[in-house]
Amino acid sequence: MKNFTLDILSGIPAVNRFYSGIGTIFMLHRVCPSEPGKFKPNDGMRVSPEFLERFITEARSKQYDFIGIDRLVEILENGEEAKKQIVLTVDDGYRDIYEIACPIFRKHNVPFTVYVTTSFPERTALLWWYALEDLIARNDEIFLGDGRIFSCGTENDKINSFIKIREIIIRLGGGRGFKNGLGEIFKNYQIDWRGKCDELALDWGHIKELSKNPLATIGSHTKNHYVLKTLAYEEALEEMSGGNEILELKTGKKVNHFSFPFGGRDAVGGREIEITGKTGIKTALTTLRGNIHREHSSLLRSLPRVPLTENFKIEWIGRPKRKKIPIV
């Protein structure tokens, strides 16, 4: 078994990996207006409504077709002739996808898939990347529970501190110790985790309504958005299969599609790809960058994607600019 999508593409000439093939799966997280002048290190997860509409109309003007994830599977499994296909996917489960993005998709008749982390609508999610953003924005120094101090006096200090503390949190891994570890890191501060979910996350009413939308597909993104590679086998299986089961119970529909939290080499390996086979899903998406090729017909549980960011241009398909701040 070959572990990873980029490895299996080794047989495709490098010049063609991005500029040939069937098309591209794009990854979004949020669609909402920017807030100029504010410290927003998570802004790379966001595109504006204006950008999304412009991207859709420009792509169509260049003869790209927007299709759903199930249609992509059909093309791959049936060996159909196709090119210039675009699949739009949205990770995590932020409420602006329902309030802002969904009307745009409906207006332009664009299919989309929302991969839901079930702790978001359950209101148990620890949205630490936004809690950290808030703390750094309003403080000149951050005092971690272990005594480490991070300067936040200048904009550059704030960005550097965000990146460093983010890495500390990610190294906690996941599972039973994550919540305690996060509590220790932030023990000098009062954080309203439930309130942050209420502010930012979809609720079950939104998700049920989306599940009835013929343009929308609901996929799974685990229960708690942990780094799966850090979990024991049974914990990782429970994160994946448990998220599927909760979504199926709430929507009354089978979950056939999954995306890996974080989704890069540090988060996903051969074991995680193998576990997806035990959950009954058809596809699993990584965050490894690349276009979709016919070879992916036998690799449906390790598909690459391209982040759709505010400065993206159609001619960059498969070759996006790298971001200074990583995507959660």
Image (tube, rainbow, N blue to C red):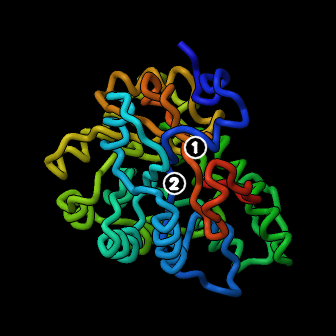
Residue at 28 percent of width and 58 percent of height: 216
Mark 1: which amino acid?
Thr
**Residue position marked by numbered label 1 in the rendering:** 287
Residue at 64 percent of width and 33 percent of height: 265
Rendering quarter of residue 267 = top right
Residue 43 x/y as whole percent: 63, 70
Q: Which residue occupies the extreme left position in the image?
A: 252
Residue 82 x/y as whole percent: 42, 41
Report how far apart the C-alphas of labels 2 and 1 lie in the structure. 8 Å
Residue 153 x/y as whole percent: 85, 77
Question: Can residue 211 be seen in the rendering of this structure?
Answer: yes
Residue 40, disc: none
The front one of 178 and 222 is: 222
Question: Can residue 98 be seen in the rendering of this structure?
Answer: no
Decide: is 171 above or below 313: above
Mark 2: which amino acid?
Met
Q: Earlier in the sequence, mark 2 or mark 1?
A: 2
Q: In the shown orientation, is residue 228 left or right of residue 184?
A: left
Q: In the shown orientation, is residue 171 left or right of residue 324?
A: left
- CB contact under 8 Å: marks 2 and 1: yes
Rendering quarter of residue 39 = bottom right
Residue at 59 percent of width and 26 percent of height: 4
Residue 3 x/y as whole percent: 58, 20
**Residue position marked by numbered label 2 in the rendering:** 27
**Residue at disc 2, secondary structure:** strand
